[in-house]
Amino acid sequence: MNKHTETKNSSGKGEGEITSVFNRRLFLRSAGLATSLGTIVIAAGCNDDDDDPMIPGTGDTVDLGSGDIGVLNYAYALEQLEAAFYTQVIQTPYNGITDAEKAILTDIRDHEIVHRDFFKAALGDKAIKGLTPNFAAIDFSKKEAVLGAAKLFEDTGVAAYNGAGKLIKDPNYLLLAGKIVSVEARHAAVIRDLINPKSADFAGDDIIDANGMDKAIAPADILAAVKGYVKDTITGANVGK
Amino acid sequence: MDIFKIIDQFQQIDGDAVGRLEYASRRHFMNKIGSKLASAAIPTAFAAIVNKAFAQSAAAVDVLNYALTLEYLEDEFYKAGNAAANLIPASDKAIFMQIGKHETQHVAFLVKALGSKAIAKPTFDFQYGGAFGDVFTNYKTFVTVSSALEDTGVRAYKGQAGALIADPQILEYALQVHSIEARHAAVARRLAATLLGNTAMKGWITGKEGAVAAIYAGEDNMTQGGVNLKGLASKSDAAITEAFDEPLTKEAVLAIAGPFIKK
């Protein structure tokens, strides 16, 4: 899970690692340009992470596609995971959940379902299939586990939208992403405040940099961070290209 | 690292950067950027690039100065609030110190990025011509104004995203600030809801719900991507409007912020 909080801005990464990330992205971008007339999935190029033993490997391979459609499918994939997560949270509330917490988590569930169904409708026949989540690692009976996972999903969602913004070519889609990302950021702040009330954690120094900025993370790194939570193998090499 | 790959990489960030950085030899350029990318100092490199390469881009300078105006406003507001005796209760101090810290950082970043193009800090009137006369003596008023400023900030940054679509790196930094303003807004709204006894006010914006009605016009929009979402997933209108935050034009934001600015 710590892996998730690393970004290209993190000084925790070694120089060699950063270089390899950049080279990989360069390679993918160049390849994407060179093959813009055809569709070639370059899964091997972006899969430099070891296989996670947590994944049973029973799912399908899902290609998000290219260009703006790829970005929308990327958002759709993440919203599917979030919606499934909060649906489970409300179906099997953790021990000792308060009315106030349940109201907040129900609101968030509904927002994520609206996001999910909105993207599905907007994408039409270009939409990826419904993903099969894998929440086996989350103990839904424990408050700490549920809110910890919620924090992870919300912070990841914010970083993902922030990182995808510059890949979007159509200003209407960019605005739509903007309308959604700030709602994800509101979720992140409220969840963090539930975990550590009245502290600085809602926009904590663990995630906000010295310029007062949230994270912006590229699709390849986000997909690597969430792959333990989905049974399908998601390929996003051409998102935004 | 191959020099041409680094320049290619940089071209991804700004398609025309190398062309505009005519003063730089490729080697000089590589040394500079190569070392910066390997550290946590990317924003510093960015600032230098904005300064030197985007100085000609009137649109980007405009947007950044507009952002700077709002950040100056927020920064001054929290500096005054955090310094005021007996205003913010000890229980909430950590929240406003953190928000204030971020606004100071945003100002510093923008001033550095804009260099000589940065506008001077205006003179502010946080009493808003008398409407918020007790803003630094009554915590309720302070939190009311805080929630309004943060929600306006979110709407303002969102409204500029399209104008930055040709400047991908500036767009990304704007988005990274935008989501911070939204984090601030959520917490300020929840504090305001409690202090004002307004149970309809949440961290997210239901319809047009907020402590200062004037700034929430259009937040109750139900149409996204050209489609009215009423009934989507059998969710309520409340949930649908909460799920999407709405932008404001620069003109609308400056009309709201105007009374704060004495100049």
Image (cartoon, grey):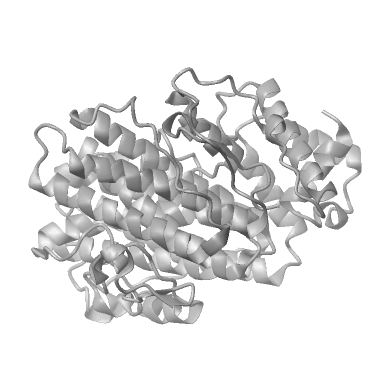
Residue in the foreground of this view, choosing between A18 and A108: A108
x then y, percent, for residue A55: 46, 24
Residue A32 higher or lower than B258, as above or below? above
Q: With B20 as the anchor, is B179 left or right in this view? A: left
Residue in the foreground of this view, choosing between A41 and B194: A41
x then y, percent, for residue B7: 83, 42
Q: With A65 as the anchor, is B12 left or right in this view? A: right
Q: In this orientation, does residue B114 appear?
A: no
Residue A176 higher or lower than B221, as above or below? above
Identified at 75% across, 32% down, the residue is A23
Q: Quadrant of the N terminus of chain A?
A: top left
x then y, percent, for residue B107: 50, 55
Residue A239 higher or lower than B200, as above or below? above
The image quadrant that residue B33 belongs to is: top right
Residue in the foreground of this view, choosing between A3 and B255: A3
Identified at 77% across, 57% down, the residue is B53
The image quadrant that residue B244 belongs to is: bottom left
Residue in the foreground of this view, choosing between B189 and B36: B189
Identified at 42% across, 32% down, the residue is A229
